[in-house]
Image (cartoon, helix red, strand yellow):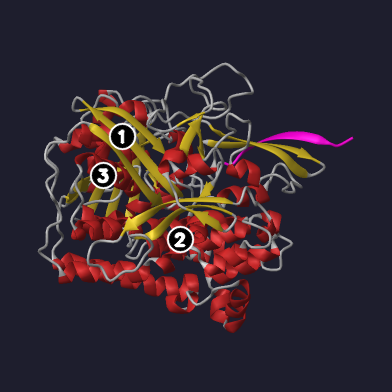
Amino acid sequence: MDTAIICVGNALIPGDDLGHRVYEFLAGQAIPGGVVVIDGGLKGIDLLPLVEGRKRVVFVDAVAGFGPPGEVVILDRETAASGAGPYDHGAGLPYLLRLLPFVCETPVPECLVVGAEGPAHPSVVRATATASLEVAIHGCS
Amino acid sequence: MANRVICDIPLNRVEGDLEIKVAVEDGRVVDAWSSGTMFRGFERMLVGRAPLDGLVITPRICGICSLTHLTAAAKALDGIAGVAPPPNAGRLRNVALMAETMQSDVRQSVLMHMNGFANVFHSGHDLYDQAVARYASLAGERSLDVVRQTKRIVEIIALIGGQWPHTSFMVPGGVVYAPPVSDILKCRNILSQFRSWYEGTVLGCPTERWLEVDSRQALEAWLAESSRHRESDVGFLIRFGLGAGLGNLGRGYDRFLSYGSLELPEGTTVAGTAGRLVAAGFAEGVTVEAFDQARIAEHVASSWYRDYPGGRHPFDGETEPVPSGDEGGKYSWSKAPRYKGLAAETGPLAERIVAGDPLFRDLIADGGANALVRQLARLTRPTTYFQAMDAWLGELIQRFGEPVYHHPGDLQDGEGIGLCQAARGALGHWVRIKDGRIAHYQIITPTAWNGAPRDSEGLRGPWEEALIGIPVSDPDNPALLGHVVRSFDPCLVCTVHVVGASGRRTL
């Protein structure tokens, strides 16, 4: 598939579970052809093989500091990667996004992060899922 | 009067959940306390569940070494069922576990330990500029290469076990699936590519040449022999480490523990010790004795659990958190495992010492263990795996069609012990099934051994002890402390808890 929606986060931690909830929501929906929805869990840099070879990847994750709680935000790769620190066992999505231009063995896909801050209320999950599908299909232009 | 300073040092590049407190007098560490700061609680989660649930739940303890927990959980249930997995199941289990360990060894060495060589603390080192170019976070040429090259090796696990991490393909009696020959051939190809890259850049020579290095003198000759040796990651580790004094830092107790691992399947051509590729044993210095799990006990005198006197064997242990009180006396969520009542370190160096490896025995003969030799054992451990992995994959092809599963029947009530060597060292699961449910589950992780707090006798854990005497010139940048602790490859995620959002990332 040319496009992937990769949902990341920790289902066990309130405030960090948005990606997982969105995955569950999308798993019950009809997904347009050419788009695959993936539960990325907490894999961080190990998501690299799922990114390579695609044209567009939309990551869904909880965010902090980009808007009021509950508001869906869309971040480009560089913005989302700005929080990357050194590698450790918890190195996550920003680490992957920061390293992507150097380690991706195919042309780097367009990468976007769709997320929201705060509790993953059903309305937030629905809005995030809708926005994720929207940018997966049409990009963020 | 000595100038005594207490420093709280969150070593968050080790893990967000580990804090080291050291007392520094006249610029050197005189005491240390290692604190796991989050509660794990997996043992409590498992009690009352169906016997097979440990196969699904315990791999979630760690996303780096999930397969080792699956291995321990499955072996414990093998024991309860009284069934030995067929030889091909043993081969599949072993090969998958080795793939995971090799990825961890290379990533930890380059991305976490050698990354510290690019710390400004070392700016006076002759090789500092090279270290920055090679190992700086998010930019070092070797760091990026390691990220690129280590992603494929775990595909072996996905081919054998369906996914990585957190697969549950091992079950009591064997494995759930016999990969077709085409997939085993893919595994061989992935292994071959990884080995070529490892030998070309990480090691700088064929594995066979490295395995000829059997003494300190031979190691010096190996370094002098070729620029490819010196410029490899192994060569750079040695040259930089010696220059930074890591060969004289972090001795610890010089007691080494290995549970043994990677049982040799019946009919294999692979040689080992007492039926295993990785030998079991306990060593004081280089004097090795047989390992007996009955001599393990966990102490909680310094841990936030309900007190009991002395130590308890894991079958008698309990996990009753007491998160307050005894201020200053209790300081960690990690328990303190002891062997024969003694603190002991575990990991790849311990494996080499217990196995009687002449190089590593020689390297610790004079000054004991240290941060450099621990890391060298880790970064070169794949050389002890390649031949066996390839042989087992070849045997899987030759013996394709043989069973990979012996039905164990209903799991009867009983006790089982699952022991193996994880990437970071000795891992054990102690399981009791009663009335068809898990009645008792105790897990001792490698980092519980290495990062243990004080025991009932008030004696320090291994890396607490290893920190004593280390110079601390800048408490805001305790680089040498970091090197020593990282030489044990700590994984506090597995030691103390399941969740780690705070250390994971914040967007």
Going from N to C along the chain, the mark reached first, 3 or 1, is 3
Residue denoted by label 3? B74
Secondary structure that dominates the magenta span: strand
Label 2 sits on a secondary structure element that is helix
The residue identified by callout 2 is: B106
Amino acid type, mark 3? Ala
Real-space Cα separation, disc 3 to disc 1, in angstroms: 10 Å
* Magenta span: B1-11
Which tag, 3 or 2, sits closer to the chain's start? 3
Answer with left or right where residue B360 lies relative to residue B62.
Answer: right
Q: Which residue is mark 1?
A: B431
Residue pictured at 58% horizontal, 83% vertical? B225
Residue B4 counted in the magenta span: yes
Say which chain tag 3 marks: B
**Where, quadrant-wise, is the C terminus of chain B in this rendering?**
top left
- Disc 2 to disc 1, how far (Cα)? 32 Å
Residue B17 at x, y percent in the picture: 51, 36
Lower position in the chain sequence, tag 2 or tag 1: 2
* Disc 3 to disc 2, C-alpha distance: 26 Å
Same chain assignment for discs 3 and 1: yes
| B250 relative to B330, above or below | below
Name the amino acid, label 1. Val
Quick one: B406 or A25, which is closer to the camera?
B406
